[in-house]
Amino acid sequence: MSEDKSQLYDFLLLPGNETCADCKAKDPQPWASVNLGIFLCINCAGCHRALGAHVSKVLSVSLDDWKQEDIKSVLSVGNENSNLKYSVPSDFKLTSSTPMSLRESYIRAKYTKTPFQAPTEKELAHLIEENKLKLEKHRGSELVSKGILKIVLREGKGLSSHDVGGKSDPYVIFKSGNQVAKSSIKKETLDPKWNETLMLNIADLSQPLLIEVWDWDRFSDDDAMGNVSLRIDNLKPNIPEERIINLEVGSISFELEYFALTK
């Protein structure tokens, strides 16, 4: 562990930081919102990701690489200070067992100032029962209702040439359902090295991961360099797996790791 990152673990020991800023759950592998300066459980982290990085940039404390400015941002706030600034005008409070649909509405209201309608006791009971039925439906299988897929895009080798001079400006798009994650563009190369981390919210593991490789063009439509459909329902939670996919010309390599939001 780097000396800088060890400051995060020390900060986690302070009152308020040892639990999730939103639902107060304890998580053995805490997450954080860098720009909000708070620590989160994995369930609330998924809701924060849905807000977009411009509202809440989410990183894993243990799994992700942190920049010095990200560490300083979190150390300057903390859960207690953040909760003095952000709140929802309602007597309703999140707990670790709050259904995801209600959790998402509450967190969106808290950090984007959108209206929140607290559920009645009857509505809350219905949501909890609905959640139980969804879990029961998937009991005994590897399918889960929600999760986060961490993608560490490593490199491409021997990709096809689409530009003058025999080079390309490749980038990669990962899709799952209506969720999309896009890599940076690497200019003038057939052997790009990304080494960057992307995240996708996963609604259904039975849906394949779609991977598209493109050549960026400034003055015309981007050129397709290849696409692959990849099964992810065989991923084991919290275990990273290295993958290499072959395109019609060349290949790309990456690491996949799945984090279940519900058990």
Image (tube, helix red, strand yellow):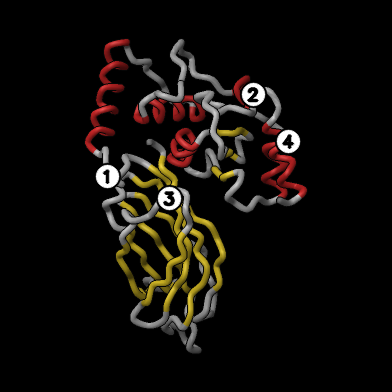
Between marks 1 and 3, how big is the CA–CA gap? 15 Å
Sequence-first disc among 1 and 2: 2
Is residue 126 something one can see in this rendering? yes
How many other residues sit within 10 Å of disc 2, few (<14), some (14-19) or many (≥20)? some
Q: Is residue 9 above or below residue 110?
A: below
The residue identified by callout 1 is: 141
Q: Is residue 229 left or right of residue 244?
A: left
Between marks 2 and 3 in the image, the one whose residue lies nearer the viewer: 3
How many other residues sit within 10 Å of disc 1, few (<14), some (14-19) or many (≥20)? few
Q: Amino acid at mark 1?
A: Ser
Between marks 1 and 2, how big is the CA–CA gap? 36 Å
Q: Is residue 203 above or below residue 24?
A: below
Between marks 4 and 1 in the image, the one whose residue lies nearer the viewer: 1
How many other residues sit within 10 Å of disc 4, few (<14), some (14-19) or many (≥20)? few
Is residue 218 something one can see in this rendering? no
The residue identified by callout 4 is: 10
Between marks 3 and 4, how big is the CA–CA gap? 27 Å
Please count the marks in the image: 4
Q: Amino acid at mark 3?
A: Tyr
Between marks 4 and 1, how big is the CA–CA gap? 38 Å
SS label for mark 2: loop
Position of residue 106 measured from the top left corner of the image (x, y, whole percent): 43, 24
Sequence-first disc among 4 and 2: 4
Please identify the quarter of the rendering in which residue 226 is found: bottom left
Residue at horizontal 22%, vertical 36%? 137
Q: Amino acid at mark 2?
A: Gly
Does the residue at mark 4 contact the one at mark 1 (Cβ under 8 Å)?
no
Position of residue 198 measured from the top left corner of the image (x, y, whole percent): 49, 55
In the orientation shown, which residue stands out farthest toward the right?
A: 3
The residue identified by callout 3 is: 258
Sequence-first disc among 1 and 3: 1
Residue at horizontal 33%, vertical 53%? 176
